[in-house]
Image: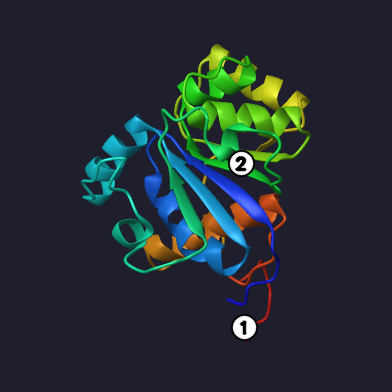
Amino acid sequence: MKQQSEQRWVVGVTGASGVRYAVRLLQVLPELVGEVHVVFSEAALRVLNDEEGVAVSGAALSYEKLCGAEASNVFFYNPRDIGARIASGSMLTAGMVVIPCSMSTLGAIAHGIPTHLVHRAADVTMKEGRKLVVVPRETPLSQIHLKNLLTLSQCGVTVVPAMPGFYSRPKSVEELVDQFVMKVLDAMGVEHSLGRRWKEPEK
């Protein structure tokens, strides 16, 4: 994939199931934008170990350990560092995506109550009028969850629920993940060629 812009994007990863979506997004995004600034919550690190077998502390987290490669334009932050660059609106970004977004993070963002850097960075993204995409992953949804989703949607946040589709007839989990991450990239407004679109001719 050819890098197509010099945009900066912030990626927040929280403690909901579906960390594989985040990992796949981080595998492709550095080739598409100028910089990627990443923060995993402590709960996300637990899910990373539980679901993907990657046991690593926040201090030791790196692109190589996460994606098995190197990327000089990806930067990681400690979730407790509320003084990090991404906690300030003076750092210009194209926006932020929270993938997956836990219900506790959803509530914190919807009500402006940040308790760690993922929340704070999302809060900054909203107050600066930048693009915020959240990928909630929970089922079933309570009325509180639904109200929080509605609140964010009314504030201009793009909600992309982790609901993979099967119309593309995926032959593997990897294809299913790619098809969903394509939806996330579309919501971010990032040009890509990750997956084939509905009824698009094969190349």
| Residue 46: quadrant of the picture | top left
Cβ atoms at labels 1 and 2 below 8 Å apart: no
Give the camera-side residue of 99 and 124: 124
What x and y, as percent, mark residue 159?
Answer: 64, 36
In the depicted structure, whether residue 129 falls above or below residue 186: above
Residue marked by disc 2: 160
What x and y, as percent, mark residue 193?
Answer: 62, 72
| Rendering colour mode | rainbow
Give the camera-side residue of 134 and 40: 40
Residue 57 relative to residue 147: left or right: left
What x and y, as percent, mark residue 43?
Answer: 33, 30
What x and y, as percent, mark residue 42?
Answer: 34, 31
In the depicted structure, whether residue 111 falls above or below residue 164: above
Mark 1 crowd level (few <14, some 14–19, many ≥20, 10 Å Cα): few
Residue type highlighted by circle 1: Glu
Earlier residue among tags 1 and 2:
2
